Amino acid sequence: MSHPENAAAAQADAMEVAPGAERAILEGWIPSLATEEEIRQALEQAFDYRGDVTITLKTGLRIEGYIFDRKPAPELYRSVVRLLPKNSSERVAIPYSEIAGLVFSGRDTAAGKSWEAWVRKYWEKKSAGETNIGIHAESLD
């Protein structure tokens, strides 16, 4: 006969390592910006992206940088995306209505990294009897 405590412990262990959320691979993607809805969806994904993007304005100017904020509004011309240009500390605000193109041009720094991998490395070290375990982030370069 199994003890209720054992069942509860097994359930807690199973919940401890839950699968991570799957992420779409966006690096290198050039979304279609033909409709207002496509523009809004692409910029939402760019906001969640952990790499640089290149925005081409309708004037032809290209700006590469990291999107750190966006302010959607009912009208496209009042919606704004904010980014930190790659080669400047200046913060730039760009109305959605001025964007002609978008490329997910930079390396996605979160690609291939997962909580499960971190936990697995931790438990491997702990099982091997290591003490004072310190798992550090991998270099991005």
Image (cartoon, rainbow, N blue to C red):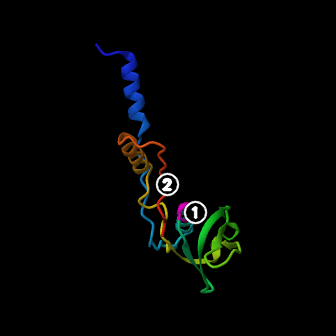
Mark 1 or mark 2, which is nearer the start of the sequence? 1
Q: Nearer the viewer, residue 114 or 135?
A: 135
Residue 126 image-quadrant placement: top left
In the rendered image, residue 139 lying in the magenta stretch gets the answer: no
Q: Nearer the viewer, residue 48 or 125?
A: 125
- Place of residue 87 in the rendered image (x, y in percent of width and height, measured from the top left): 63, 79
Q: Please name the residue that numbered disc 2 is placed on.
A: 136
Image height of 126 relative to 45, above or below? above
Q: Nearer the viewer, residue 108 or 55?
A: 108
User: On the rendered image, what quadrant is the N terminus found in?
Assistant: top left
Residue lying farthest left? 1
Span of residues in magenta: 46-50
- In the picture, measured across the screen, residue 73 lies left or right of residue 17, that is right
- Place of residue 80 in the rendered image (x, y in percent of width and height, measured from the top left): 67, 68
**Mark 1, other Cα within 10 Å: few <14 / some 14–19 / many ≥20:** many
Q: Secondary structure at mark 1?
A: helix
- Place of residue 32 in the rendered image (x, y in percent of width and height, measured from the top left): 48, 73
- Place of residue 16 in the rendered image (x, y in percent of width and height, measured from the top left): 43, 36
